Image: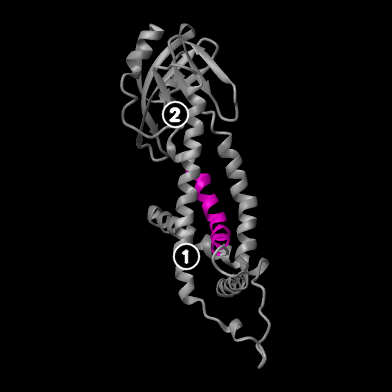
Amino acid sequence: MSLDVRDIIDRMIVPAAVIAVFALLRRYLPARRTPPQTPTSSHRTLEDFSGTQWAVGFSMLLVALAFAYTVHMALVAANRYFAESDGPATFQLLPSSAIWWFFPGIGALCSTWEVTLSLWSLFQDHERIARYVAWSNERTGFDSTRALRWMALLLAMPIGVATILAIPMHSSLRNRDIAVGRYARFGREHLPYSQASRLVRVDGFRDRDGKLNAHAGMIVDFKDGTRWRSADNRDFTPEPDPGLAEFLQQKTGLTLERFETEADLGAQAR
């Protein structure tokens, strides 16, 4: 029964959050009221943009996809360039490409509206676009432009900064050492194989219900207390990178141990 209740609550969180956000936007960033109609008012203020809305929505989708894809590829390229500057490496372990989608996604959400309007202004008079914006705001009940600018400032910008700080993350397994780029550190940490003290393969980790989740990787402990993990920030896979275990055994001269999880390894004498 408790699991059913938890499942229901989990399903309700997103709709409840959306409703709450819309309510806050309508309260604190309300749409600007259009002046009441008079017999002398221009008929253009009564214009219905229902048909235009579909064209704008489709254009926004194209702009969002182009923005997200371009920024994602730029982040992937920057991360790869940073790793390749280590020089020749037998293995180059990069973070999961999924982490490079957060900022492009939220950035597209926050910027697509104004980018689309700017592109539209190249082909349409500004007065008509302003009327469309007012019409759209009245339908949603809040000022879309101001709301998205606040989202860009409070949400997209921090995520963007956090993402840029992740660009150095990688591991380059070279002939004599492992060059490690860590989060928010633009210098490398060098881990010589000659200083390795333990070599372990783990299969994954256990969730709160005790189920083993496959996230296989190699762990190397060094004499100075540093622990290197090949699976850090990488995709979940049932097996480590092909050939990685053999390469590390050859370079460190250590016997390979195997545990289900890193927690099991921590319980062992080092």
The residue carrying pointer 2 sits among few (fewer than 14), some (14 to 19) or many (20 or more) residues within 10 Å by Cα, namely many
Residue found 56% across the figure and 57% down from its top: 115
Q: Is residue 224 above or below residue 52?
A: above
Q: Residue 3: x percent and y percent?
A: 39, 52
Residue found 38% across the figure and 13% down from its top: 248
Residue found 43% across the figure and 35% down from its top: 96
Q: Amino acid at mark 2?
A: Leu
- Give residue 125's quadrant in the image: bottom right
Residue found 46% across the figure and 40% down from its top: 73
Give the residues in magenta: 101-120
Q: Is residue 243 above or below residue 132?
A: above
Quadrant into which the N terminus falls = bottom left
Q: Residue 53: x percent and y percent?
A: 48, 71
Q: Which mark is residue 166?
A: none
The residue carrying pointer 1 sits among few (fewer than 14), some (14 to 19) or many (20 or more) residues within 10 Å by Cα, namely few
Identify the residue position indicated by label 1 in the image.
57
Q: Residue 205: x percent and y percent?
A: 40, 32
Q: Hey, which residue is sitting farthest front in the picture?
A: 123
Nearest to the observer: residue 54 or residue 239: 54
Identify the residue position indicated by label 2 in the image.
94
Mark 2 lies on a secondary structure that is: loop
Distance in Å between CA atoms under marks 1 and 2: 36 Å
1 or 2: tag closer to the N-terminus: 1
Q: Is residue 117 above or below residue 91?
A: below
Q: Hey, which residue is sitting farthest bottom in the picture?
A: 39
Q: Amino acid at mark 1?
A: Gly
